[in-house]
Amino acid sequence: ALGAIGGLMFPVVGGVMAAVGVAGAAAYATTRDDDVGSIARTAGTGAAAAATKAKDFNDKHDITGKATRAANAAVVKGKELDNKYSIMDRAKAAAKVAGQAAHTAYKKAEAYDEKHNVSGRVGSALSGALDRVSTGLAPEQQYRVGADTPAASTLPAAPGK
């Protein structure tokens, strides 16, 4: 039972091949004569009982049937509303306008950056700030990325080490 439950549940998390492996491992575990086997058999019995209770509950209250009917009714209602109010067409049109607006805004920002070098200035400011931080943390040495960057083995040890 444990192997079957593992095989049915694991595809949600790990894929079909992993589910086959988990089912096989769980089934093997139940054949062992040690604590692992005992635990696996107990877990399998509990899982089988839980599955049986869930099926009985569903049979009594028709949960899956009600959920299916509710989902189907929602789809039908959604289609009716779309036919009446053209929701999908309006959403597509709105998405197209938004996409065009985003493209225009991007092009304007790109032109502004090209004219005023905003990204270059921000990059320089960030670089300078990082240089000041590294100088503040290790005033005796200032590290810059590049050909002269020291290897990790030449860096000073962390405080307290």
Image: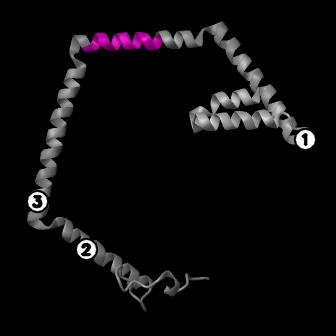
User: Please, what secondary structure does the residue beneath circle 3 have?
Assistant: helix
Q: 33 or 49: nearer the eye?
A: 33
In the image, the segment drawn in magenta is 70-82
Seen from this angle, which residue lies furthest right?
33
At 40% from the left and 81% from the top, the residue drawn is 134
Distance between mark 3 and mark 1 Cα atoms: 73 Å
In this rendering, which labeled residue sits more in front, label 2 or label 1? 1
At 43% from the left and 85% from the top, the residue drawn is 150
Q: How far across and how far down the image is residue 49, in percent?
A: 77, 21
Residue type for callout 3: Tyr
User: Please, what secondary structure does the residue beneath circle 1 have?
Assistant: loop
Residue 137 falls in which quadrant of the image? bottom left
Query: Left or right of 11: which side holds 130?
Result: left
In this rendering, which labeled residue sits more in front, label 3 or label 1? 1
Residue type for callout 2: Ala
Q: 47 or 127: nearer the eye?
A: 47
Q: Residues within 10 Å of mark 3 (few under 14, many from 20)?
A: few
Mark 3 touching mark 2, by CB under 8 A?
Answer: no
Quadrant where the N terminus sits is top right
Badge 2 or badge 1: first in the primary sequence: 1
Say which residue label 2 marks. 125
Badge 3 or badge 1: first in the primary sequence: 1
Residue 34's label in the rendered image is 1
